[in-house]
Image: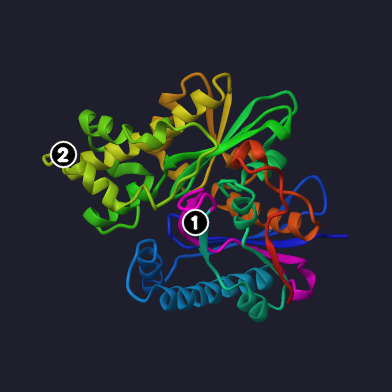
Amino acid sequence: MAALYIGLMSGTSLDGIDAVLVDLSGPEFQVLGYCSAPFSVALKSELFALNAAGDNELHRAALAGNALVRAYATQVQTLLTQCQKTPDDIRAIGAHGQTVRHRPQEFDGTGYSLQLNQPALLAELCGIDVVADFRSRDVAAGGQGAPLVPPFHQAFFAKPGRLIAVLNIGGISNISVLGADPKNMLGFDCGPGNALMDAWCQQHTGRAYDADGAWAASGQVHTSLLADLQSDPYFSKLPPKSTGRDLFNAAWLAHKLARHPQVLAVDVQTTLTELTAWACAESVHKSSPSCQTLIVCGGGALNLELMRRLQHGLHGAVVESSDQQGLPPLQVEATAFAWLAQQAVERKTASLKSVTGARGARILGAIYPA
């Protein structure tokens, strides 16, 4: 019997929604359909603004969650039409929501991770069970609540007898180290992914991102600025660790740039690209120095200049796109949330103490019946 799940992902890059319909009935996952859509200008602007303190936040966040879910529902309908399925064919939707604050273990010892979402509305609009709120159970157990995807990476990408690392480069970058024993696998956030590069590119060129890394490829790394960026304590912090726009944001970059006022805009872009490549390569060196294969997914896998710099930093390993493993880079995280939804529906744990630092493995996600 087919076990059909839909996975929805809108990540810290704030570039839009990726949606997949996946058959998870057997050991070999099969993506049956994929679609994507950018956010409207108004929704993207509001989601970005809600990453920082502002007026009337509770009201604005609730309405942004409604708008986000209506955009989700449109993608669900597109998938159903594309794959000639009905809501009754789908076991559940995995909907992560949009992370706007991520502060685990802070303030009161537990902290929080906040995703804008309205899963009850999504269940109402789609007529399909929805699984959401994947982070809070792990945070309640003393964990980081992130990254969530390493157990999925283990299920999909692991090869017997091989040490493989999987690098997801979204707005923030995170790595999974897949070894022989899944219970001892590692996973953590490396640092910035596309977030800083995209924001700088938007500010100075009007383009949402640096296509193929072409703008970065035309500049030079500013060595003293790079050293200043690399000096952030996050990079030397030992895992378990996770981060987000709470740290790596425009204000963080502006503070650093204030000490380097003469750097050309193009050279800042090159330096930010090198920073992301360095943070990811350092994470591989520290966590899996004997790794021979690095599989890259997320939007960063499409940035040719970033991939070139990453390969240069990991000259002893093969750096390849997840495309070569049968799953295109922009489909990996959405597929992960379909898989996480299945784990919740089947009451299986989907977190690892070795990844998040929680007191133990937990069942992640809350279920909203249709």
Mark 2 residue element? loop
Question: How many C-alpha atoms fall within 10 Å of the one at disc 1: few (<14), some, or many (≥20)?
Answer: many
Residue at the image position 75 percent from the left and 54 percent from the top: 343
Q: Residue 163 at what x, y percent from top left? A: 65, 25
| Residue range of the region highlighted in magenta in the rendering | 83-110
Mark 1: which secondary structure?
loop
Give me the C-alpha separation between circle 1 and circle 2: 31 Å
Residue 217 position, x and y percent, is 29, 37
Q: Is residue 150 left or right of residue 241?
A: right
Q: Nearer the viewer, residue 28 or 99?
A: 99
What residue sits right under mark 2 in the picture? 259
- Which three-letter amino acid code belongs to the residue tagged 1? Gly
* Marks 1 and 2, the one that precedes in the sequence: 1
Residue 11, numbered circle = 1
The residue positioned 45% from the left and 65% from the top of the image is: 38
Q: Amino acid at mark 2?
A: Arg
Residue 105 is a magenta residue: yes
Q: Residue at 76% across / 62% down in the picture?
A: 4
Number of the front mark, 1 or 2: 2
Camera-side residue of 14 and 316: 14
Q: Quick check: 87 left or right of 269? A: right
